[in-house]
């Protein structure tokens, strides 16, 4: 039977809403998380920040891999995630949408198999596809000249 890959993160409360996240990997630094005021003190990224970071990082890595697969050099890639919140029917605050803009560090002119890479890179992003099961995620890709490449 195949082994199921897992990731473990341990959180330890430091004070109030501030936690230390330990990723259980030797050499990997711990990360301090916190809630914004009035609950916390903004001593680190909030869960909203972390979710946006996870989605944007996964998409940026997937796009980089897809473009490099065809011998392109799109570096440096920059990703900007916007995490929107709204109240649900029970008046509870929820993440309602995540928008991610990916910016290539190079012009798209001359990139090999660009259309193919753009058409498939999101499908290989484990985090984004998992989050999309419950939260809309909109993705746009721009090249270094500011030309929007996706969605077409």
Image (cartoon, helix red, strand yellow):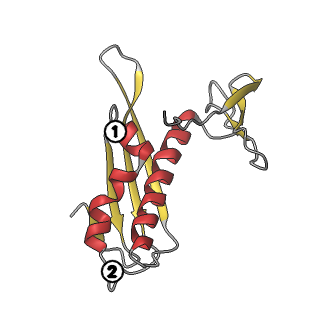
Residue at 46%, 59% (x, y): give it: 60
Q: Can you give x and y, in whole percent of width and height, for residue 115 in the image?
A: 25, 70
Is residue 142 or residue 88 the one in the foreground?
142
Residue at 44%, 72% (x, y): give it: 68
Q: Nearer the viewer, mark 2 or mark 1?
A: 2
Image quadrant in which you'd find residue 119: bottom left
Q: Can you give x and y, in whole percent of width and height, for residue 108 in the image?
A: 34, 79
Is residue 58 or residue 25 the one in the foreground?
25
Residue at 34%, 13% (x, y): give it: 90
Image quadrant in which you'd find residue 9: top right
Q: Can you give x and y, in whole percent of width and height, for residue 72 in the image?
A: 42, 78
Vertical comparison of 114 with 12: above or below = below
Mark 2 or mark 1, earlier in chain:
2
Q: Secondary structure at mark 1?
A: loop
Per the image, the residue denoted by label 2 is 112
Vertical comparison of 87 with 33: above or below = above
Q: Work out which quarter of the rendered image holds the C terminus and state it.
A: bottom left
């Amino acid at each position: 039977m195949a082994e199921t890959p897992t990731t473990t993160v341990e959180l330890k409360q430091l004070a109030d809403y501030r936690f230390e996240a330990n990723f259980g990997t030797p050499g990997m630094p711990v990360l301090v998380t916190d809630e914004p005021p009035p609950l916390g003190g903004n001593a680190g990224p909030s869960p909203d920040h972390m979710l946006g970071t996870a989605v944007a990082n996964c998409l940026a890595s997937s796009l980089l891999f897809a473009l490099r697969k065809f011998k392109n050099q799109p570096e440096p890639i920059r990703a900007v995630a916007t995490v929107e919140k709204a109240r649900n029917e029970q008046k509870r605050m929820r993440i309602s949408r995540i928008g991610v803009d990916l910016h290539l560090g190079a012009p798209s002119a001359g990139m090999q198999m660009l259309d193919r890479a753009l058409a498939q890179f999101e499908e290989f992003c484990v985090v984004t596809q998992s989050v999309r099961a419950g939260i809309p995620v909109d993705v746009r890709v721009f090249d270094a000249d500011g030309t929007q490449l996706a969605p077409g």
